[in-house]
Image (spheres, helix red, strand yellow):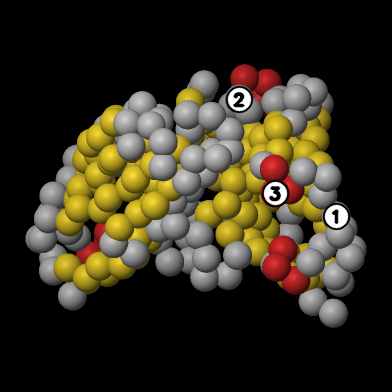
Amino acid sequence: DIQMTQSPSSLSASVGDRVTITCRASQGISNYLAWYQQKPGRVPKLLIYGASTLQSGVPSRFSGRGSGTDFTLTISSLQPEDVATYYCQKYSGAPFTFGPGTKVDIK
Amino acid sequence: QVQLVQSGAEVKKPGASVNVSCKASGYAFSAFYMHWVRQAPGQGLEWMGMITPSGDRPTYAQKFQGRVSMTSDTSTGTVSLEVSSLRYDDTAVYYCAREKGGLVTFDYWGQGTLVIVSS
């Protein structure tokens, strides 16, 4: 099975900072990569699919890039409401594995 | 609007079984696959498997094969997850999640059902 890793596991940044999270697949998955945001005590929310396509209603400060094995999620200007854990997920084929998550908070 | 409403929390003993239901509304039930994802306390998301709307082709993660069963009832718009031979490490929040139109990403999620395995 393809394994998904994320780095860093956690980060702390100031409001307005540019934040980048990396997700890596153990084998190429083309662009079959999604990102989710899970706020504390809440249900996960789809942010990005197809590695770079923003889900409807998601603020434009979120963006995704990558293909093959290396992917990034960028928040261009971190806001207090972005405090959450972010997960990548591969969907190139079953099992549809999630990464271990990156916890983002405000410094 | 799309809603996935799950059944309530459960407390079960080790070795028992649990059934979690997820009732869908606000969209054409027969047009979308449904998945189950679980999250142990303080841990990440774990994909468990998926079911077609007709219920004829469940696919389970290898880890859960032989111990989980997913069913779908188009007459009520409800999918169900049964986990048998419960262990302490099955304690988790179980989510149903709708597949986004042909892409195996999850655009709508149930509110989650907490299953506690405790003696």
C-alpha distance separating marks 2 and 1: 26 Å
User: Alpha-carbon neighbours of circle 3 within 10 Å: few (<14), some, or many (≥20)?
Assistant: few
Question: Looking at the rendering, which quadrant does residue A30 occupy?
Answer: top left
Q: Residue at x 22, y 40 (%)?
A: A63
Residue nearest the observer in this picture, B100 or B57: B57
Tag of residue B63: 3
Left or right, B119 with respect to A98, comes to right
Tag of residue B84: 1
Chain under disc 1: B
Which percent across, then down, holds residue B101? 51, 23
Chain under disc 3: B
Which percent across, then down, holds residue B64? 73, 48
Mark 2 / mark 3, whichever is N-terminal = 2
The amino acid marked with disc number 1 is: Ser
Mark 3 / mark 1, whichever is N-terminal = 3
Which percent across, then down, holds residue B58? 74, 31
Where disc 3 sits, the SS reads helix
Left or right, B92 with respect to B55, comes to left
Q: Is residue B78 above or below residue B31?
A: below
Quickly name the residue at label 2. Answer: B32
The amino acid marked with disc number 3 is: Lys
The amino acid marked with disc number 2 is: Phe
Q: Residue at x 63, y 61 (%)?
A: B93
Quadrant occupied by the C terminus of chain A = bottom left
C-alpha distance separating marks 3 and 1: 13 Å
Question: Looking at the rendering, which quadrant does residue B70 occupy?
Answer: top right
Mark 2 / mark 1, whichever is N-terminal = 2
Q: Is residue B15 above or below residue B4?
A: below
User: Alpha-carbon neighbours of circle 1 within 10 Å: few (<14), some, or many (≥20)?
Assistant: some
C-alpha distance separating marks 2 and 3: 24 Å
